[in-house]
Amino acid sequence: MKNIIGNINKAFDHRIRLGIMSILMVNEFADFKMLKELLGATDGNLASHTKALEKEEYIIVEKSFIGRKPNTRYRTTKKGREAFKKHVEAIEKLLKQ
Amino acid sequence: MSTEEYLKDITEIKDMMSKSSRFFSLSGLSGIMAGIYALIGAAVAYYLVSISGRDYLILDGKIFRYILLDLVAVALLSIITAIILSTRKAKKNNETLWTGTSRRLLIAFLIPLITGGMYIMIKIVSNHYGLTGSLMLIFYGLALVNASKYTIGNVKYLGYIEIVLGLICAVFPGYGFWFWVLGFGVMHIVYGSLIYFKHDR
């Protein structure tokens, strides 16, 4: 039991961060606009949550230009994918009890 | 956190995974309409061939050109209807029509379809048009199976059915017309209705 709780990850303890990770688990990458639309978050709100995940090294940011427009896109790291899988497994185990 | 909150988390994860990777606003109604256009187009073709006095087609006749025109009209009407109705459905669902997902859907759909279209054209130009019905069904089926991972999963089964119909049709090329009616007319109406009742309302 204690072990399972240990696997529940605080970094994913928020709807927006959970959403960002879910989207990036099934897409090679997603840009800022796509995340914003899917999650219904404001610019500032989304930016602070992506920063938090970046700090944990769960996602990486790639900045580039499409024509003259700056484009920010995100992808998961190996560490992020493993952490997320562990987190989901922990939730599933808790729910089964 | 309580069990309820964990359940909500799991639902949210599933929802975001499917919403971000599948385009759900594919309109069932447009499938039904495509089936109806195909049936009308087939009836027109049947009539054209019957008034020609033969019960088979020859390539360089006027009738053949009319039938090609008939086919193009069916395809164009189906595409336009699909775009209009899917745009409407996307608006209703608060989904954007043109996203990375719908772009991927379109590319996955078009690659087998255009390959097949070009192959059929090449064969027609060199006078091998006996298997056109079969080839249309097979390549259309492959396009559907390929695109189904980006949209409503059921589309995959429509694809399998079209492929099987196309293969059977290759064994009985003389009945190509009737397989075409079944695959493009009847099956579109059946699957369009399924999607309509399950996802549109």
Image (spheres, grey):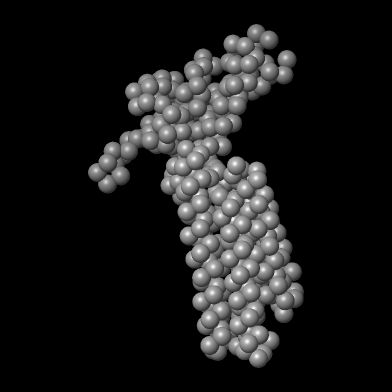
Residue B189 appears in the figure: yes
Q: Residue at x 27, y 46 (%)?
A: A67
**Total marks placed:** 0
Residue B118 in the figure: left or right of residue B57: left
From the top left corner, tell me how far across and down residue B62 is, in percent: 53, 88
Q: Would you place residue A59 above or below residue B34 in this image?
A: above
Q: Quadrant of the N terminus of chain A?
A: top right
Residue B163 in the figure: left or right of residue B88: right
Residue A65 in the figure: left or right of residue B82: left
- Among all residues in the image, which is located at the extreme top? A2
| Viewer-closest of B130 and B199 | B199
From the top left corner, tell me how far across and down residue A5 is, in percent: 62, 11
From the top left corner, tell me how far across and down residue A35 is, in percent: 43, 33
Q: Residue at x 69, y 75 (%)?
A: B176
Residue A43 location, quadrant: top left
| Viewer-closest of A66 and B129 | B129
Q: Would you place residue A15 above or below residue B98 in this image?
A: above
Q: Residue at x 55, y 73 (%)?
A: B71
From the top left corner, tell me how far across and down residue A68 is, in percent: 24, 44
Q: Residue at x 62, y 11 (%)?
A: B2
